[in-house]
Image (spheres, grey):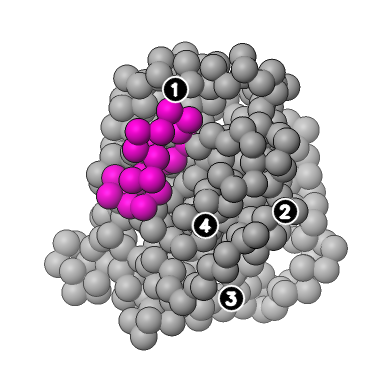
Amino acid sequence: MFNLTSEQLNTLKATHTAQEIYQQPNVWREMVTDLFQEKPQYDAFLEGIKQKHGQVRVIFTGAGTSAFAGDTVAPMLRQLNDTSIQFESIATTDIVSNPEAYLLKDVPTIMVSFARSGNSPESVAAVTLGTQIIDDFYQIIITCNKDGKLAKNVQGDDNSLLILTPEKAHDQGFAMTSSFTSMMIAAYGVFTTQAESATDIDRVIENGKQVVNDIADVIDDIVAYDFERIVFLGSGLLGQLAHEASLKMLELTSGKVVAVHESSLGFRHGPKTILNDTSVVVIFMSQDPYTRKYDLDILRELATDGSPIKLVVVDEQKDAEVEKLADWLITVNKQTDALSNDFTLALLYVIFAQALALKTSIKLGITPDNPSPDGRVNRVVKGVTIYPWH
């Protein structure tokens, strides 16, 4: 996997992380199969809430990568759904510290909790606050752990749904990889029609199988360049995906590589000052013709400003101008048919970001499966005090 043997991965303590990145297309297939078997139940649950209330607010929530799953999927679902459902993404860390700023007593609400373990203190506290503050409160728990507190808390609750990802998505490595993409697919499948999401994800899965096998050489070439700073850019939901990409680099390199994210348009408004002579900028290109214009503008600007920064562009298919401007171009759609939206691209783009973080971690002599052996940060967060709300 990724130009490393099983023996090398074992020695480098990278086996779990590498496998969990590589396996994603197969895990997605299992997730979709399970999801569509239960799709009539999910549709009936949502339809019952809409019929009762007319309009409903959906809050995607989680902490860290789980929060970024909601940030990434929410914009697409706002586009695809009617106005009877309002989608928002609010981190549990915001809800718990400021519940009355985010939870509205008189607004019927479905809280969709993304959780790998389902045991994070803020995740449990957020749903507790929802039950205390909101009159008409419903839950959808999307988790990798059937034995977690979130999953157990909704057993027997008619106002809740529990959606479990495949067992393989319950990442054993420190960083969330399979869990992140599987949870987003689950949310996408729940809130879109079966025909719509099945066609989209089928194409993603087939392309994903090629991406995990094709990207190792170009990633090794990028990693051979001794960068100390990396910036991930994108527009719309791909700008939100950039947040997750930067976190993967920070986590797996134990902070030794400075990694930040910004929108393609927002980068000029101050954040661009982070660039120095050892910087890499990664641009996630949109497939939307209008949005893409702004991604191209920042690419042209960075490519022609005379600085020694290196540019990596992740795109759906080859584009002659992009190929000329970029130092490295990674394409994720190997088929004739175009992918339908930026969310489907996000699932493939993040594989590149995960694998780049993995190989950078290894180059720096860090153990990817446990990049923080001193316990400064933990797989399930520790040290959080939850105060009673009243």
SS for dot 3:
strand
Task: Tell me, yes or no, whether the two marked residues, 1 and 4, touch with CB atoms within 8 Å.
Answer: no
| Crowding at mark 3 (Cα within 10 Å: few <14, some 14-19, many 20+) | some
The residue drawn where x is 71% and y is 73% is 275
Q: Which residue is mark 1?
A: 42
Of discs 3 and 4, which sits in the foreground?
4
Residue 270 vs residue 330: left or right?
A: right
- Amino acid at pointer 4: Ala
Of discs 1 and 3, which sits in the foreground?
1
C-alpha separation, residue under disc 2 versus residue under disc 4: 14 Å
Q: Which residue is mark 4?
A: 125
The residue drawn where x is 29% and y is 32% is 30
Depth order, front residue of 134/377: 134
Q: Earlier in the sequence, mark 2 or mark 4?
A: 2
- Amino acid at pointer 3: Val
Q: What's the magenta region?
A: 140-163
Of discs 3 and 2, which sits in the foreground?
2
C-alpha separation, residue under disc 1 versus residue under disc 4: 25 Å
Q: Earlier in the sequence, mark 1 or mark 2?
A: 1
Residue 136 vs residue 194: left or right?
A: right
Q: Which residue is mark 2?
A: 100
Q: Earlier in the sequence, mark 3 or mark 4?
A: 4
Picture layout, residue 119 above or below residue 42: below
Image disc number at residue 258: 3
C-alpha separation, residue under disc 1 versus residue under disc 3: 41 Å
Of discs 1 and 4, which sits in the foreground?
4
